[in-house]
Image (tube, rainbow, N blue to C red):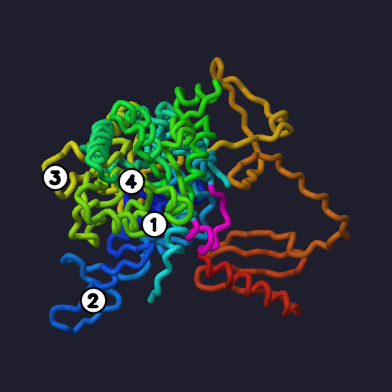
Amino acid sequence: MKLYCLSGHPTLPCNVLKFKSTTIMLDCGLDTTSVLNFLPLPLVHSPRLSKLPGWVSKDGTLNLEKELKECTGRVFVDSQPEFCLPERELLDLSTIDVILISNYHCMMALPYITEHTGFTGTVYATEPTLQIGRLLMEELVNFMERVPKAQSCLAVQISPLSSGYSLGSSNWIIQSHHEKVSYVSGSSLLTTHPQPMDQSSLKNSDVLILTGLTQMPTANPDGMLGEFCSNLAMTIRAGGNVLVPCYSSGVIYDLLECLYQFIESANLGTTPFYFISPVANSSLEFSQIFAEWLCHNKQSKVYLPEPPFPHAELIQTNKLKHYPSIHGDFSSEFRQPCVVFTGHPSLRFGDVVHFMELWGKSSLNTIIFTEPDFSYLDALAPYQPLAMKCVYCPIDTRLNFHQVSKLLKEVQPLHVVCPEQYTQPPLTQSHRSDLMLELQPPPMPYRRCSVLNLPFRRRYERVYILPELANSLVPSEIKPGISLATVSAVLHSKDNKHTLQSVPKPPPMPPSKKRKRHGITEVKVEETADGHILHLQAEDTLIQLEEDGTHIVCDNNEPLRTTLRDLVLRFLQKL
């Protein structure tokens, strides 16, 4: 068994597992953090960005004024952003049989695999993951196309388990009759809107592949929600606007639910909330229809019937309005002060770029970061100097190191495999040994482009026996309850299913003519003082075998004498 690591981002994984002649890709994450090295893509012409000076090396030997721009002491690429794809040279991706997707954030690189590598296998994901992942892909493509810029089956059984992280997110069990591999990615034990994590099914795993832990191990999600609401209320009361850069699915559902309970107590009932995304309407609708992937409290509301999420009521009362973009109806209905949820969290493309240019010069306004995927300082760098207030409230409900250590003690896998980032403290907090995995035996670390030989030996294989062959067996009891029987059979293997079949009877020999017998049949051997004499009576021939020579006496039959000479020489050479 081997594990190939195609991604260097532990929360956007892409691994390939070779198990029982089956090649399985575990997630297909797209690392978008590379976009922080690019300038934002404004929806309308930005004089500030267009006037940024080009970059020239200090010695003047390298001039890249058209490609690179300087902004507040940093250098950015002036082109359409590019993403970091999974490695495609480490192995032949056309040989992949199955792709397992754990959540909709971990499938954004899927088109690069399914469309450009000769992939002919099957992709498995839960229905919510599939639908919401498609929305996120459509949104990302829409963001990029709106602002074009000049450029330079199986041998194993697989089962999804609820991971508790997001709508439709899942962990995967990959098992044969005698071996079991668990893939745990993007999981949560907190009580939020998704169905709770299934922990018991992870027990008795030979290998557990662990990835997608929280990026904010020291931040409490409940505390971050409290800070989010209080900062939002303070800004609105002061007459400012609040900008929340976010994904179109996931944490935004919890933010809207928190605000639903907070609006009246904070006297924000008249404040408009806007959700702007090309897929805003679809995202809000999908969240209401996948009841089987929601927590018990929200599932029960479906049968009342009531909408599982309270944002349905916010929409009905016009407290929350959603639009595909800032153009069209939004421009005529927009009023301030307000709260705007929009993307992209990197601040490099999407409608958020327009609001950064619009509101960034006023200290009354606030931008609140809730997504943990990007450094907020790097995200803000192209907009400096910035007058608007910045609040960092990263809400990451995925497992932290304490939770995952407790989980592993309960499920007790024989071996744990994880990104090497989890086996050492963060560089900025090297003294925090609690921010790493300390297990016995130690976990096996991997990094981008690494290939691991997993400590996993297949010892048994299930073999089926055909009924007619089973009927012919005669078992003998060797001790009470145990019987043995010998079997002669042919092992037939196909698609990793092994079957014992009866030995086929040999075909009857076709009738043949009676063959004449050839060779020497009557031989008399005499022992002498110097050796032996072989008397071929029918041929009237003598062969004298002595220590210093061999003589063949054969009258008037030269062909026979030559044949006998050759035979004797051949035997002597073998001695």
Among numbered discs 4 and 1, the one appearing first in the sequence: 4
Quarter-wise, where is residue 234 in the image? Answer: top left
Among numbered discs 2 and 4, the one appearing first in the sequence: 2
- State the SS at label 3: helix
Mark 3 lies on residue: 429
Mark 2 lies on residue: 54
Residue 309 percent location from the top left of the image? 45, 31
Q: Label 4 amino acid?
A: Gln
Give the CA distance from mark 2 to mark 4. 37 Å
Asked if one can make out residue 230 in the rendered structure from this viewpoint, the answer is yes
Among numbered discs 3 and 2, the one appearing first in the sequence: 2
Extent of the magenta region = 111-123
Most extreme residue toward the bottom is 61
Give the CA distance from mark 3 to mark 2. 36 Å
Q: Label 1 amino acid?
A: Gly
Mark 2 or 4: the one toward you: 4
Q: Label 3 amino acid?
A: Gln
The answer to whether residue 119 is above or below residue 334 is below
| Disc 1 crowd, CA 10 A, few/some/many (<14, 14-19, 20+) | many
Give the CA distance from mark 4 to mark 3. 42 Å
Numbered label attached to residue 350: 1
Mark 4 lies on residue: 336
Cβ atoms at labels 3 and 2 below 8 Å apart? no
Q: Residue at x 59, y 22 (%)?
A: 483
